[in-house]
Amino acid sequence: MSIDEILEEMDELLDKASSVPFASHKKVIDGERMRELINDVRLNMPHELKEAKKIEFDCQRILNEAKLNADSIIRKAEERAQQIVSREAIVTEAKKKAIDMLTKAQTAAKNLQQNAAVSVAKMLNDTENYYARNLQSIKAVKGKITNSVSGQPQGGAGGRFPVE
């Protein structure tokens, strides 16, 4: 029996059924016969309809798998993005610290150079003063020696250094 024949028989069953009193739109039918007809419909479903249900089930399964895969890919992409952002933040912070350290080192080096230049200038000035005083002392001694050799009495009370 084909589906169309089974459906025709169901239609006849409804047409022959008696109406419920006070509810003409409701009918009393043979439940056992209706169940047999429904089972016959199920057994006689066209192959294409069964395939369509199988395809619908497969499509739903594939969609669910795709959704799970998409969620997994999105989650992994978000994690990767967070790692990249985190690394970028670390790199940015490291660059800031490096620039700060470089600036401090340059400032310290400049201060050290200035302090060294001041210290060297002071040492040179002190050395120059020391040698200037020694030069004056040498000139004074030389002058005394020259005066004592050129006509002053030797070795007496007038000269300080006895010449022999």
Image: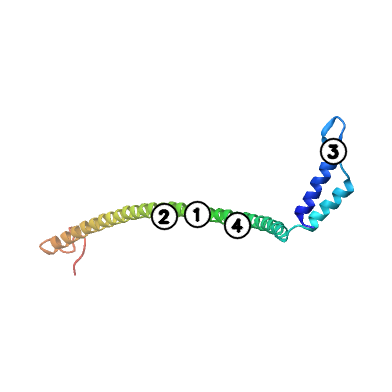
Cα gap from disc 3 to disc 4, whole angstroms? 56 Å
Element at badge 3?
Answer: strand
Residues marked 3 and 4 touching at CB (< 8 Å): no
Cα gap from disc 2 to disc 4, whole angstroms? 42 Å
Cα gap from disc 3 to disc 2, whole angstroms? 96 Å
- Disc 1 or disc 2, which is closer to the eye? 1
Can residue 157 be seen here? The reply is no
Q: Position of residue 104 (x, y in %)?
A: 42, 52
Q: In which quadrant of the rendered image does the C terminus lie?
A: bottom left
Cα gap from disc 1 to disc 2, whole angstroms? 21 Å
Residue at label 3? 27
Element at badge 1?
Answer: helix
Residue at label 1? 88
- Disc 1 or disc 3, which is closer to the eye? 3
User: 108 and 80: which one is in front?
Assistant: 80
Q: Could you tell me which residue is drawn at 77 percent across and 57 percent down?
A: 2
